[in-house]
Amino acid sequence: AVTSCSRASRWSAALAVVAGIQPGLQLSIVTLGASISACAKGSEWRLAERLLNDIQTSAFQPSEIAFSAALHAGERAFQWARALQLLREMKAQSVEACTIPYSSAVSACEKAKRWKTALELIGRSMPQQGIELDVAAVSAA
């Protein structure tokens, strides 16, 4: 149900489903990730971050997908500094990153008119992490 709400960009419905899970039933990392994605699609970056923090303080290991969704939410809200922090958190927690979270961070920098930071990401940070440049990252910078 949460994934369906996420696909329909219905973040409030997704969170209502999560909140209504009966005691004794456990949330899964997939459910929480889908909730973060729904928040991202609804430009609710603070809620996306709160859910990511919930994952980090639970027994779950946050996935690259959960971080990418939170980064996407921040990108839509021009949260470039928070995007960079999330990339650092991914590295600190040994969450392997691909091009997607970096592209979101580059785009957040671009939207906030932080072009030097965007260029630093694609010129230095991505190559150092072994992340391949893609059209989205280069276009955003």
Image (cartoon, rainbow, N blue to C red):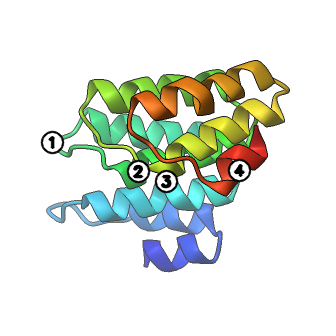
Instruction: Point out the residue furthest to the right here.
Output: 113
The reply, left or right, for residue 132 in relation to residue 62 is: right
| Residue at image coords 47%, 37% | 50
User: From the viewer's perspective, is residue 36 above or below residue 123?
Assistant: below
CA–CA distance between discs 3 and 1? Answer: 17 Å
Q: Quadrant of residue 59?
A: top left
- The residue pinned by badge 1 equals 59
Q: Say left or right for 39 vs 1.
A: right
The image shows a total of numbered marks equal to 4
Q: Badge 1 local density, few (<14 within 10 Å), some, or many (20+)? A: few
The residue singled out by tag 4 in the image is 43
In the rendered image, the quadrant that contains the N terminus is: bottom left
Q: Which of the numbered marks, if any, corresponds to residue 36?
A: 3
- Dot 3 amino acid type: Ile
Which residue is labeled 2 in the image?
Answer: 66
Closer mark to the observer between disc 2 and disc 4: 2
